Every structure is written in C-alpha cells, then in structure tokens.
C-alpha cells in the first residue's frame, strides 16, 4: 500500500513538472543575448562573408550571438519605436542592419560602435535582432 | 507656342513620373497568426525588407524566419525547428508586381486598393499567389498593407505540436511604411 502511494505520488510530481515546464517556464523564458558569449567580428568582415558565400556564412553565424564592430551609417526607428542602426559594411548594396531591444536616443552617425545581438540571416543586409549597444564613441 | 508649352508640360510630367525613385524600407512588419485552438499562436517580425518601384509596380519582400518573435519561447523554438525549419530555409520572400499600380496617384493623399501578383516563397517552396492590399498616401509618404492567408500544406509545412492546435491556414499581415 505504501509503495503505491509513493509510485502514484512520483508520477503526479513528474506530470506536474512537465506541465510547469510547457505552460509556465517555457512561456516566460526568453533568450537574452546579453548573457551569451558572442563571436566578435567587424561589420566589413561580416558583410563580405555573407556576400561571398551565404550558406557558409549561415553555418558560422546564423542564430549565433555576434558582437559587431563598425561605423554607424544610419539611425532609424521601427514601427514599435525601437531604435534601428545600420552599420557600414564597406559595400554600396549591403550593410549590417541591427534592431535594438531598447530605445537609444544618442546614437551618432559616422561614429564607431559595438553592437551585440543575434544574427538571423541575410536579405540584402546582414540582419541582427534583439541587439544591445556594448560601447560607442 | 501653346503647342510647345503643352509638349513641354507633357514631357516634364512624364519625367516626374519616372523620377519617382525606388521606395524601400528595412523595418516593415509582418504578423503571423495560426491560432487553431484556444491558445494563440501569433508572432511578429519587425525586420521585413521591402522594395517597390512606383513606375511599374514591381515589388520585392524579403524576411528572415528567425526574426519572428512569439510570446512563448517554446512555441518559437517549435516554429523554427519543426515547422519552418529556419536553419535550412532562413528566408521567406515575395517577388512580383502590383498589377493595377497605374490607379495609384502617389502625389494625392488617399487609400488605394491594389492587387499584387507574384511568387511567394516559404520553407523552400515557391507558389504563385495573388493577394489584395492597400497603398496609403499621406502627406507625401506611402505605406503598404496586405492581409492574406496561406495554406500551410501548400508550402509543405507539417509538424507535430504538443499541447496546441495549429490552424491549417495561417493569416499573414504586412505593414510597410516607406
């Protein structure tokens, strides 16, 4: 009799843990790129890697945290009001386009910047999302 | 003299039309909704790349599947790994023409109904589609909206999802401000 109580009790506990994971923990957990170790790369290197061989660059950088260094080419705002920063890639058709996770007002064009974010691929720009500014001057 | 003036006016107006350069944005919005049951399956992508040529209506969209953000991380992981296989197929795109672009007067404020005809590519599968939309001109700025549905089976999107029910047709809303 005691055995049964333990068995049923532990099954219930496991079920509760799974339900907790699926419906509560997973629903709340969000990837935070700030906690991840990033691959350091310059915007020029990144743009040329993607323009030379997109699939090879994807195996190296897609879905990875990157720390991109470069010169600010353009500052904008998306429809949610978050800041977007285009980093020069020394290529007329292609740059690194970053969407920040926050609103930053004092980003200046033509200044050096370091941005950490997740690389999600290549359209005509290399696109970085969920980004944070690490340093600027 | 009058004739020449008219000719000049005609020429300059056609020049004006040609001078309408490429409209583009990198921060267009795409919303995805495939709610089938009680739990909502919704995601937003804020990095839609869109280019449109007002002179002939040519239009190109490109978006990166890994840019879709769900409220639920587990759902986002399933979406990427099991359904869209975004490591294998990182991009989705639409290439085509707005067939009735001539009805849109980019110089006059208003809401214009348009139809786009072209090829939608999702999950590595190309499908010819025709979709309605609107172009809004407000104080010289153009914006483009479209709302359409795609059958997931048409794009060979099939996964098994635990817990939630996914709809057979996903609704996609596009909003680009140029």
Image (tube, rainbow, N blue to C red):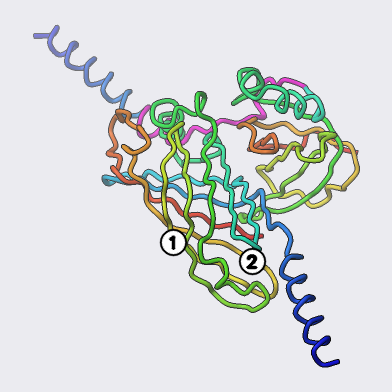
The C terminus of chain A - image quarter: top right
Q: Are marks 2 and 1 on the same chain?
A: yes
Asked whether B140 or B126 is in front, the reply is B126
Asked whether B165 or A73 is in front, the reply is A73
Q: Secondary structure at mark 1?
A: strand
Which of label 2 and label 1 is nearer to you? 1
> Residue at 12% of width from left, 10% of height from top?
A4
> Residue at 82% of width from left, 35% of height from top?
A91
Q: Which residues are magenta?
A: A21-40
> Residue at 56% of width from left, 52% of height from top?
B29
B109 left or right of B129? right
Asked which quadrant contains residue A55, the reply is: top right
Asked which quadrant contains residue B84, the reply is: top left
**How would you rate the neighbour count of disc 1 (Cα within 10 Å): few for under 14, some for 14-19, many for 20 or more?**
some
Q: Earlier in the sequence, mark 2 or mark 1?
A: 1
B1 left or right of B57? right
B102 left or right of B160? right
Q: Secondary structure at mark 2?
A: strand
| x, y percent for residue A59 | 61, 18
The number of callouts visible is 2
Asked whether A8 or A76 is in front, the reply is A76
Numbered disc 2: what chain? B
**How would you rate the neighbour count of disc 2 (Cα within 10 Å): few for under 14, some for 14-19, many for 20 or more?**
some
> Residue at 46% of width from left, 36% of height from top?
A28
| x, y percent for residue A71 | 87, 37
- Distance of mark 2 from mark 1, alpha carbons? 17 Å
Residue B154: say if magenta. Answer: no
| x, y percent for residue A136 | 86, 37
Does residue A119 lie above or below A5 as drawn?
Answer: below
Residue A27: say if magenta. Answer: yes
Q: Circle 2 sits on which residue?
A: B142
Q: Circle 1 sits on which residue?
A: B132
């Amino acid at each position: 009799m005691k055995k049964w109580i333990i068995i049923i009790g532990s099954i219930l506990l496991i079920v509760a843990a799974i339900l907790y994971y699926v419906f509560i923990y997973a629903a709340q957990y969000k990837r935070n790129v700030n906690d991840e170790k990033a691959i350091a790369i310059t915007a020029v290197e990144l743009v040329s890697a993607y323009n030379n061989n997109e699939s090879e660059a994807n195996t190296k950088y897609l879905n990875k945290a990157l720390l991109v260094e470069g010169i600010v080419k353009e500052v904008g705002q998306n429809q949610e009001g978050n800041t977007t920063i285009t980093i020069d890639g020394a290529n007329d058709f292609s740059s690194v386009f970053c969407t920040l996770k926050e609103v930053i007002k004092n980003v200046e064009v033509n200044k050096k910047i370091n941005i950490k974010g997740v690389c999600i691929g290549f359209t005509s720009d290399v696109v970085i999302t969920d980004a944070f500014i690490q340093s600027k001057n | 003299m009058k004739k020449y003036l008219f000719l000049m006016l005609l020429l300059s107006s056609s020049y004006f039309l040609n001078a309408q350069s490429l409209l583009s944005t990198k921060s267009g919005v795409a919303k995805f909704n495939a709610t089938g049951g009680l739990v909502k399956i919704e995601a937003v992508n804020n990095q839609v790349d869109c280019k449109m040529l007002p002179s002939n209506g040519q239009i190109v969209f490109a978006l990166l599947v890994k840019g879709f953000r769900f409220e639920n991380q587990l759902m986002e992981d399933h979406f990427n790994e099991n359904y869209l296989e975004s490591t294998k197929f990182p991009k989705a795109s639409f290439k085509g023409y707005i067939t009735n672009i001539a009805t849109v007067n980019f110089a006059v404020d208003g809401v214009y109904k348009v139809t786009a005809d072209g090829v939608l590519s999702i999950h590595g599968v190309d499908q010819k589609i025709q979709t309605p939309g609107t172009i809004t001109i407000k104080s010289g700025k153009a914006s483009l909206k479209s709302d359409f549905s795609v059958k997931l089976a048409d794009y060979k999107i099939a996964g098994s999802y635990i817990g939630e029910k996914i709809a057979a047709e996903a609704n996609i809303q596009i909003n680009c401000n140029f």
